[in-house]
Amino acid sequence: MNVKILSKSQNRIKFLLEKSNPAFANALRRVMKSEVPTMAVEFVDFEENTSGMFDELVAHRIGLIPLTYDEKAYSLKNDCKCGGKGCSRCEVTLVLDKQGPCTVKAGDMKSTDDSVQPPEKDIPIVELLEGQRLKFEAVAQLGLGIDHIKWQAANVGYQYAPIVKVSNADPKIADVCPTHVFEKKDGKVKVVAEDRCTLCMRCTEVSEGVTVQSDDSIFIFDVESVSGLTAKEVINKALDVLEERAESLAESVKKNVK
């Protein structure tokens, strides 16, 4: 397998995966999305909430706020030495006390661990009017997106690599293509950005001089982090999970198949 980076930023990476197959591509997608540990609030204890929102709604919003964390300091609660009872190695506390009028934001929460912070400080939680107050203590822990959406690591999609060819095609295809795959010049049209093709097939409806196919051994991945992890961290952790499972399977086969 070969990987080629098409575009890269802290929270989003687009890459090409070559010499692979749909089974592996989908396994990688599922792990990146739902089986990479991330940090999120699990419990909220309200001391006072006189805002216009019920406790349950405020707690739901708090739970969906992504949080950064030090992977060396925390482990999943089920894997922790405390046996799931809760300790400093699997839980972290965040507190908030705000008086209106103001808009309470994610950055207003104070964490007992500097490594556990919302990467986006301006995410709104609730608006407080004059005389209203919000005070709570929240407990965050690691979890998996397969258990709850608040722990989803990333939005991940992929498509087969497009193969676009033109031969005496109608120049109108350059106008109908939503991703500008074609370029029109001197009454002729040519392919200038094949990797942008989304396989919508609009060009084939306009002209018979263009063919669009896909290669099911090459995949274009688009990974956008929606957690406290960077897109690069999501990909690396997902590969570690797949590698660990493959090694576990190989060991099991060697032990039981003789």
Image (cartoon, rainbow, N blue to C red):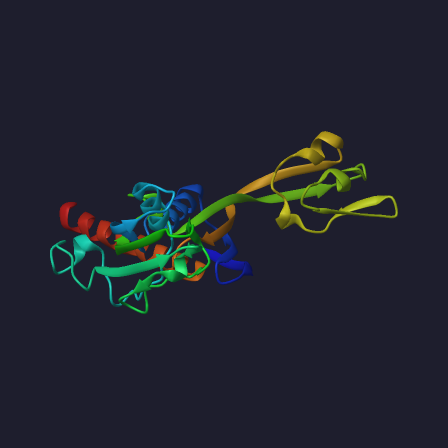
Query: What residue is rendered at 31% in x and 59% in y?
Result: 96
User: Between residues 116 and 11, which one lies in front from this camera angle?
Assistant: 116
Query: What residue is rendered at 71% in x and 36% in y?
Result: 203
**Where in the figure is residue 235, as x and y percent of width and height?**
41, 57
- Residue positioned most to the top: 205
Where on the picture, by quarter, is residue 137?
Answer: bottom left
- Residue positioned most to the bottom: 114
- Residue 229, can we see it? no
- Residue positioned most to the front: 131
- Residue 198, can we see it? yes
Where on the picture, by quarter, is residue 197?
Answer: top right
User: Between residues 165 and 57, which one lies in front from this camera angle?
Assistant: 57
Where on the picture, by quarter, is residue 89?
Answer: bottom left
User: Between residues 111 and 212, which one lies in front from this camera angle?
Assistant: 111
- State whether residue 202 is above or below residue 149: above
**Where in the figure is residue 136, as x and y percent of width and height?**
27, 54
- State whether residue 188 is above or below residue 71: above
Query: What residue is rendered at 30% in x and 41% in y?
Result: 56
Query: What residue is rendered at 31% in x and 46% in y?
Result: 59
Q: Is residue 102 left or right of residue 204?
A: left
User: Between residues 56 and 238, which one lies in front from this camera angle?
Assistant: 56
Quadrant location, the N terminus: bottom left
